[in-house]
Image (cartoon, rainbow, N blue to C red):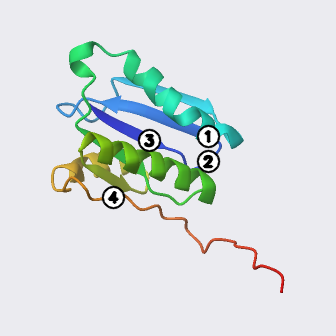
């Protein structure tokens, strides 16, 4: 199974895709995560995986929406996705645009394990400079 993660805004989307048929998700959940994304993301991933038969639970890859989007939401999503991919020793691929899921799934085969996905924020981060 391939886990797809989209955390670019206040609504978070997770889906599971069968690598043999990557056009339609086997299972998906969405929720208004707002400012609770860091607290909720791993629990929701576990919830999505728990609904699958035991033999189909094995993840073979992770795809993530790279952006643009909220700086904090993208950062949280990419951190969780990269850590999960690294801990499971599976490839991760990121993509942007309307067809991001299929593009990222298509590039998984050529993505080496250990490679990480980077977010694309769409603009420079708005960082407040410290006062002198």
Q: Where is residue 23 drawn, in percent x and y? A: 28, 35
Q: Quadrant of the N terminus?
A: top left
| For residue 35, side relative to residue 60 (left or right) | right
Q: Residues within 10 Å of mark 4 (few under 14, many from 20)?
A: some
- Residue ID for mark 3: 5
In three-dimensional space, the C-alpha distance between marks 2 and 1, rounded to whole angstroms, equals 10 Å
Whether residues under marks 2 and 4 lie with C-beta atoms below 8 angstroms apart, the answer is no
Of residues 81 and 67, the one drawn nearer to the viewer in this rendering: 81
Closest to the camera, between mark 2 and mark 1, is 1
Q: Is residue 122 left or right of residue 34?
A: left
Q: CA distance from mark 3 to mark 4?
A: 14 Å
Helix, strand or loop at mark 4: loop
Indicate the secondary structure of the residue bearing disc 2. loop
Rate crowding at label 2 as few (under 14), some (14 to 19) or many (20 or more) other CA atoms within 10 Å.
many
Neighbours of disc 3 within 10 Å: few (<14), some (14-19), many (20+): many
**Relative to 132, is 23 above or below?**
above
- Indicate which label's residue lies in the foreground, 2 or 4: 4
Q: Which sits earlier in the primary sequence, circle 3 or circle 1? A: 3
Label 2, on which residue?
9
Q: Note whether 75 is above or below 120 in the view shown.
A: above
* 19 sits left or right of 42 in the view: left
Along the line of sight, which residue is nearer the eye, 60 or 120?
60
Measured as percent of width and height from the top left, residue 2 is found at 29, 35
Establish if 81 lies above or below 59.
below
Q: Earlier in the sequence, mark 3 or mark 4?
A: 3
Q: Mark 4 — residue?
A: 116
- Secondary structure at numbered mark 1: helix
* Residue to which mark 1 is pinned: 37
Between disc 1 and disc 4, whose residue precedes?
1
- Which marked residue is nearer to the observer: mark 3 or mark 1? 1
Mark 3–mark 1 contact, CB under 8 Å?
A: no
- State which tag comes first along the sequence, 2 or 4: 2
């Amino acid at each position: 199974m391939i886990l797809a993660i989209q955390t670019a805004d206040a609504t978070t989307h997770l889906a599971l895709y069968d690598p043999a048929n990557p056009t339609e998700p086997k299972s998906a959940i969405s929720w208004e995560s707002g400012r609770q994304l860091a607290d909720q993301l791993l629990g929701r991933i576990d919830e999505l995986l728990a609904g699958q038969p035991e033999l189909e639970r094995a993840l073979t890859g992770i795809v993530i929406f790279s952006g643009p989007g909220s700086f904090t939401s993208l950062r949280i999503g990419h951190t969780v996705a990269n850590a999960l991919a690294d801990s499971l020793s599976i490839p991760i691929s990121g993509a942007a645009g309307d067809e991001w899921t299929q593009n990222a799934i298509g590039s998984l085969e050529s993505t080496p394990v250990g490679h990480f996905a980077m977010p694309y924020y769409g603009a420079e981060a708005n960082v407040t400079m410290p006062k002198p």
